[in-house]
Amino acid sequence: MFAGISTVGTGDPIKLYTPIKDSGSRLALGTMTFLVAEHFRTAMTVIASPDLIAKLDHVLKAGSPDLRTRMLQEVAGLFLEDAHRLSERHVEVFDDILIRLSESVELRTLTTLSRSLADLHLVPRELARRLANHDDADVAAPILRGCECIPETDLIDIAWMRAEGHLSAIAGRKAVSQELTDILLMRGDSSVLRALAGNPGADMTSAGLAMMIDAAERDEDIAGALVSRKDLPHRALADLVMRSAPRQQARLLKIARPDIQDVIRTAIDAAAARAAASPPATIDPAEARATVVAKRFQAV
């Protein structure tokens, strides 16, 4: 019998599980899961004692992976159902138990858990941190993208250590600091940069913006996302347009907001004037062939 959870004000232990003769049977494990769930449903002011946690660990070690998964789903469901009215102390209780239940379960179960927690205002903090730093990007991404409780220091560490799946999720957060943005620009691939460029909450330093414009020369999606940003300085916009090919310039003008179209037209005219003033050098075909032949002889 578990006797480690008590309701505040009474101190009376609540029986969570009465042993069945075959304690390893599916029925016994299912009964325990049900009674744990029922306890949390009816006693919102709960305190988890070390004795309960130790016994829970013992049962989980003796039980099957299916038991752990079913208990995790049940307790997580209870948390989600009552999350809007839980105190921080209640969340800490759930946090401790959910961490234990989430160990050694299938990735798809953790991914579902991560998605369900990502948008909550009050979440089990340590569980969220562990999910955010999970090796599997599908598990980590929902928390990294949507959970506001992840500390900035954790996000910075993850941005330095993890690969593109994690980086893309961080790039999609509601707010991305300048330090994080610079790290993502240095380490991310084109998909990460596209996510940053299209995220109005991504704060960029002048150096970071210069890196983004460099990338936009090679990626029209990044260029289009930058032009759509309301915080893009006109000077940076003109630089982007002048460094673009004529076809890309026409595209940027077409998708631009009316209030910046004059800036783009002016930049297009400036780029055309500069190109006319510095025409490309003509190449003598005979001289080019002679140069190639000479290099071949030198190589021999």
Image (cartoon, rainbow, N blue to C red):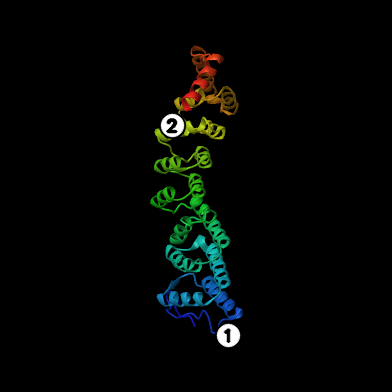
Query: Which of 238/286 is in front?
Result: 286
| Image quadrant assignment for residue 248 | top right
What residue is pinned by disc 2? 210
Q: Which residue is mark 1?
A: 22
N-terminal of the two: label 2 or label 1? 1
Question: Does the residue at mark 2 contact the one at mark 1 (Cβ under 8 Å)?
Answer: no
Question: As drawn, which residue projects farthest toward the front?
Answer: 300
Name the residue rendered at 50%, 68% in the picture.
101
Mark 2 is surrounded, within 10 Å at the Cα level, by few (under 14), some (14 to 19) or many (20 or more) other residues, namely some
Which of the 4 image quarters holds residue 261?
top right
Q: Amino acid at mark 1?
A: Asp
Which label belongs to residue 254? none
Residue 7 in view, yes or no = no
Query: Element type at marker 1?
Result: loop
* 28 relative to 277, above or below: below
Q: Is residue 23 visible?
A: yes
Q: Is residue 90 left or right of residue 32?
A: left
Instruction: Give x and y (percent) for residue 200.
Output: 49, 38
**Residue type for callout 2:** Ala
